Image (cartoon, rainbow, N blue to C red):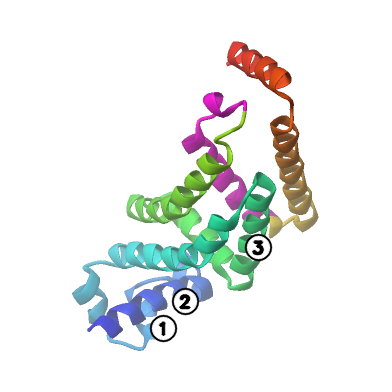
Amino acid sequence: MADTRQRLIDGAIDTIRTHGIAGTSARTIAATAGVSQALVFYHFGSVNDLLRAACLDATQTRVDAFADRLDQVSDLRGLLAVGRELHAEERAHGNVMVLAQLLAGAQNDTGLAEATSAALDLWIAPIEETLERLLAGSPAVDLIDTAGLARAVSAAFIGLELYEGVAPEAAGAALDSLNRLAVLFEVVDDLGPVARRALRAKLRRVG
C-alpha cells in the first residue's frame, strides 16, 4: 500500500511535468503511476488532495537535500550562491516547469493554491532561520522583518526562475544585482563601532 501511495505521489509530479496542470487528472496520474485510477481516490480522496501530498513530498525532499548547505552558509553571498545552485538544479530536473504549472493552476483553484502555498512554506522556513542567523549582528537587525525578508527572497527567486524562461540574460543580471546587495551588507557589517551606531540611529529615524 505504501508503495502504491508513493507511486501516485511521484506520478502526480511526473504528470504535471509532462502534461502540464491542464492535462493532470486522476486518469493521467494513474496512467503515469501504472496503477488503477480508483486508487487515486482510495489513497487520497481527491486529485487535489493527491496534488497537495505530492507538492509537500517533492518539496520536502528538495529542502532536505539543501539543508546541510544552508547550515554551512556564513554570509548573504553564500546564501545567494546556494540559491543559484538550487535554481540550476531545479531547472535541470524540470521542477521549475512544475512550479510554473502549479502557480498557474492555483490562480483559479483554491485547493491547489493552498497546496502550493504549503509547499513554498517548506522552503521559506529554513531560509528564514538562515537569515536570522546571518543578520544577528547587523546594525539593521532591529529594523528588518526577517520573516518578511525570507518571503521576499523566496518570491524573488520564484520570479527569477520563471523570468529566466523568457529572458535568461536579464534574469542573470537580476541575480548579479542581488549579489551586489549582499556585498553592501558586508560593507555595513565591517564599519567601526562609531559608524555602526550612527547608521543604526539613522535607520531608526527612517524606520
The amino acid type, in three-letter code, at marker 3 is Glu
Q: Is 165 displayed left or right of 140 in the figure?
A: right
Q: Nearer the viewer, residue 145 or 11?
A: 145
Residue 13 included in the magenta stretch of the image: no
Q: Which residue is mark 3?
A: 85
Mark 1 vs mark 3, CA separation in Å = 29 Å
Residue 14's mark? 2
Most distant residue in the top direction:
205
The image quadrant of residue 197 is top right
Q: Residue 204, how many percent across, how many down? A: 58, 15
Q: Residues within 10 Å of mark 2 (few under 14, many from 20)?
A: some
Residues rendered magenta in the picture: 139-163
Q: Residues within 10 Å of mark 3 (few under 14, many from 20)?
A: few
Of mark 1 and mark 3, the one earlier in the sequence is 1
Q: Are marks 2 and 1 in contact (CB under 8 Å)?
A: yes
Mark 2 vs mark 3, CA separation in Å = 22 Å
Q: Is 8 displayed left or right of 71 in the figure?
A: left
> Which tag is nearer the camera, tag 2 or tag 3?
3
